[in-house]
Amino acid sequence: PNLEVLNLMRTRLDDQALYAISNSCPGLLQLSLQLCKDITNKGVIHVVKNCTKLREINLDDCLKVHASVVATMVLLSPSLRKIAPPPNFPVSDRTRKSFSRQGCLLDY
């Protein structure tokens, strides 16, 4: 329950596991899901909604997470400060500035 940092890089997690983690550890501050091939938008959104203090999330190489989920995450969780977006996320100065105005850094 007091877990604040969780690195799940290269694990075989799915959305059900993310539901359980976010329900059990609502105080998470940092979460790395890098290279978790089986998580989807639904699992990520559930984490962002339930872990209201989440400041950093790494979705690098999460192939089933769509680029569109990043904007939704920022809107749902004003506490987010740093996101490593999933593959195919459109990188542009405009995008970076937009997220920066929300106080969130895109990490590549």
Image (cartoon, rainbow, N blue to C red):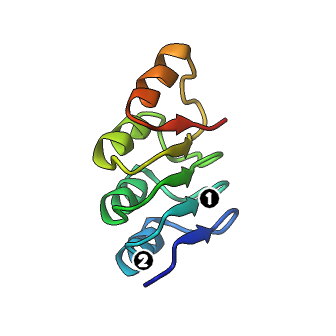
Q: How far separated are the C-alphas under marks 2 and 1?
A: 19 Å
Which-is-in-front pick, marks 2 and 1? 2
Q: Is residue 105 above or below residue 61?
A: above
Q: Which mark is residue 51?
A: none
> Between disc 2 and disc 1, whose residue precedes?
2
Q: Residue at x 56, y 69 (%)?
A: 13
Q: Quadrant of the C terminus?
A: top right
Q: Nearer the viewer, residue 16 or 55?
A: 55
Quarter holding the N terminus is bottom left
Q: Residues within 10 Å of mark 1 (few under 14, many from 20)?
A: many
- On the image, the x and y values in percent for residue 26 come to 37, 73
Is 2 on the left-hand or right-hand side of 8? Answer: left
User: Which amino acid lies under the numbered mark 2 shown in the image of this protein?
Assistant: Cys
Pointer 1: what residue?
Answer: 36
Who is closer to the viewer here, 65 or 100?
100
Is there a contact, CB below 8 Å, between mark 2 and mark 1?
Answer: no
Callout 2: 10 Å neighbours few (<14), some, many (20+)?
some
Q: Residue at x 44, y 65 (%)?
A: 15
Q: Measured from the top left, where is residue 84 in percent x and y?
A: 59, 43
Q: Mark 1 belongs to which amino acid?
A: Cys
Circle 2: element type:
loop
Who's the residue at 37% across and 45% down the image?
A: 73
In this picture, is 97 found above or below 76? above
Q: Secondary structure at mark 1?
A: loop
Quadrant hosting residue 10: bottom right
Is 51 positioned to the left or the right of 96 in the image?
left
**Residue 29 screen position, x and y as percent:** 49, 64
Relative vertical location of residue 14 with respect to residue 75 in this rendering, above or below: below
| Residue 25: image tag | 2
Residue shown at 47%/21% (left/top)? Answer: 97
- Number of labels in the image equals 2
Q: Is residue 78 above or below residue 88?
A: below
